[in-house]
Image (cartoon, rainbow, N blue to C red):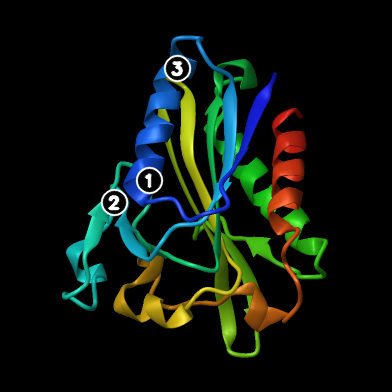
Amino acid sequence: MKIEIKKSIKPVKYDVAIKYLEERLLEITNNKKSDLIWVLEHDEIYTAGTSYKENEILNKSIKIFKTNRGGKITYHGPGQLICYFVIDLKPRKKDIRKLITLIEKTIIESLAEFNIKCFGDPKNIGIWVNTNSGIKKVAAIGVRVSKWVAYHGFAINIDNDILKYLNIIPCGISDKGVTNLKKINDQNYNKLSDIIIKNLSMNLEI
């Protein structure tokens, strides 16, 4: 199954990206386009998924962009790698759980190439690391499925401003923190986007 790869160098506005994904969703549903993997970065924005609650907004002065992805509230901004996709699940046995597992596997395998050990959590979706101050999230996952086409994606914190998460309860999880790759291991992550694309493409073919 052919997958189109798209990489944006300049930051993409969140609403522009979502509109593009939804248009691609229709094109794939109508068999006019192939699957898509799109790597980009967003300017600063807080987004709320379909299951968020108002009490998860700790700073009432921030603006929240409501979206139709699954999940709760998260933060996007400079220094964060966003990987969006639009994937037809019909040739993949219509298995949503398997897709989430493949996403988790992709992130874990990719970060292992930088000697970072991380793991998924069946109770709390996302990718986590053990730190000296407890378990912290390093990657968030949010997916929506329409007519067996999955879209939205995941975000990996590389060098983003962790203090921004103090304005919210990230992903509705109050007893665990958030970190980024630079805090875990201060090294060069310039090749991470290419590694993510390679591993996700391979895993989707399994």
Expressed as whole percent of the image width and height from the top left, the position of residue 200 reads 70, 41
Q: Note whether 145 is above or below 74 in the view shown.
A: above
- Check disc 2: other Cα within 10 Å, few if <14, some if 14-19, many if 20+: few
- Mark 3 or mark 1, whichever is nearer to me: 3
Q: Pick whichever of labels 3 and 2 is earlier in the sequence.
A: 3
Q: Residue furthest front?
A: 10
> Dot 3: what SS?
helix
Relative to residue 86, is residue 16 depicted above or below?
below
The residue pinned by badge 2 equals 51
Left or right: 170 as drawn, with respect to 114: left
Q: How far, Cα to Cα, is label 3 from label 1?
A: 21 Å
Q: Which mark is residue 70?
A: 1
Residue 4, given in percent of the width and then of the height, sits at 63, 28
Q: Secondary structure at mark 1?
A: loop
Camera-nearest label, 3 or 2: 3
Quickly name the residue at label 3.
Answer: 27
Asked whether the beta carbons under mark 3 and mark 1 sit within 8 Å of each other, the answer is no
CA gap, disc 3 and disc 2: 27 Å
Q: Quadrant of residue 16?
A: top left
Q: Quarter of the image holding residue 136?
A: bottom right
- Given contact means CB atoms under 8 Å apart, are the residues at marks 1 and 2 in contact? yes
Image quarter for residue 204? Answer: top right
Residue type indicated by callout 1: Gly
Q: Quadrant of the C terminus?
A: top right
Query: Residue at the location (80% across, 62% down)?
Result: 112
Residue type marked 2: Ser
- Mark 2, secondary structure of its residue: loop
